[in-house]
Image (cartoon, rainbow, N blue to C red):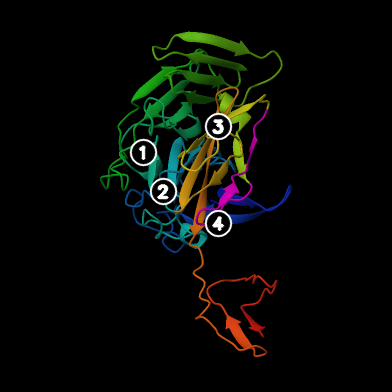
Amino acid sequence: MNQERWTERIVEIKPTGLNTGEIVWEWNLWDHLVQNLYPTKNNYQPTIIDHPGLLNINYNNSGNNRDFIHMNGIDYNAELDQIVVSSRYMYEIWVIDHSTTTAEAASHSGGNSGKGGDFIYRWGNPAAYGAPGNAVFNVVHDAHWVPKGSPREGWLGVFNNFGVSNNISAVDLFQPPWDGVQYTHTPGQAYLPLTYGYRHATNGFSGNMSSSQQLPNGNMLVCLAAAGKVYEIDPNGNQLWQYTTNFSWIPKAWRYSRCFIEHPKIAVASPDPSICSGGGTQLSITPTATNVSGFSYEWWPAEGLSDVTAQNPIVSGLTDTTFYTVKMTTSNGCTATASIPVNVLPLPAANAGVDVTILSGQSAPLTATGGDSYLWSTGETSAGIMVS
């Protein structure tokens, strides 16, 4: 069959300027294909089910659907260093290893998983990799991990557009079989779990896009894109409020905390000051935050500080290197911290030699060692002078 097919890729970009950046990591789906129809063609394997880390290029190939993958959701888990994506037309989510190099991501080995850029976990439609079992997803968007600090943290979640019926969508959450090192899987079987661990049948329907957000208090924010509606439910599924737009779809909704918007930061003027034993210096910081009327400060430890509540306290009398930490709190209760190590240097032990006795009219050299600069009572600034 000769058909046009679109591939997918993920790129990580490091900003290099206001409108520029460089690709520092890349993953391409086309590096991870499998097919069992044409022995003389690339990526041939006799059985698909034995290679669940690869995409069966011939699955869902009816018609001339160029966009037969349609990745539409992505999330990054920094703790695991993994990426999850959702595929609309494969009815699946895929987890890949981000700890790889770009070269390893194009291969089948390397990274924390040892599997390179192959899928290290997939879920939602066992038939896509030749496994037995029923499909849970029917058009899927918004693959993500439940955020840390929320109930069911570490679970995976999706918006299952036709999850309940052709008229009711679903938010499905499920706990992947992660043992702390890898996703467990029995060869020849579908990836566990067998079905979702939590389902919310949405208060309406959207056949496209949409999202959900699990909140720390157990509530959930739900966005029905095509209906132009956003609402929040409590842990028992009761709707608390709803917003409906009158002019357009709402592709996705997200609640940001006040502190995320304020984005408090501390800039340290001198991040690593050095003083001589018994000397002093000033600790200087500059706080920034959006739409904030004021700041308060708390420094610790208190040893040697002129004022533990000052923005820029004086430190004096130290004889040992000390690490100071400041907690800055905005007028709205948001916080940021910074640390400043004050490095205490030992006093130089000057060695001026022995007493020198000279007769009237004679001369003799005086020398000193142990320092970087010198000041004799005569005004000389070198390590050695001649007296007469």
Q: Residues within 10 Å of mark 1 (few under 14, many from 20)?
A: many
Residue position for label 3: 309
Of the residues under marks 3 and 1, which one precedes in the sequence? 1
Magenta segment boundaries in residue numbering: 269-290
Q: What x and y, as percent, mark residue 306?
A: 55, 38
282 left or right, relative to 219 = right
Q: Nearer the viewer, residue 267 or 247?
A: 267
Circle 2: residue type? Phe
CA gap, disc 1 and disc 2: 14 Å
Number of the front mark, 4 or 1: 4
Circle 4: residue type? Ser
Residue position for label 2: 119
Q: Residue at x 41, y 19 (%)?
A: 218
Circle 3: residue type? Thr
Q: Nearer the viewer, residue 208 or 321?
A: 321
312 in relation to 294, above or below: below
CA gap, disc 4 and disc 2: 50 Å
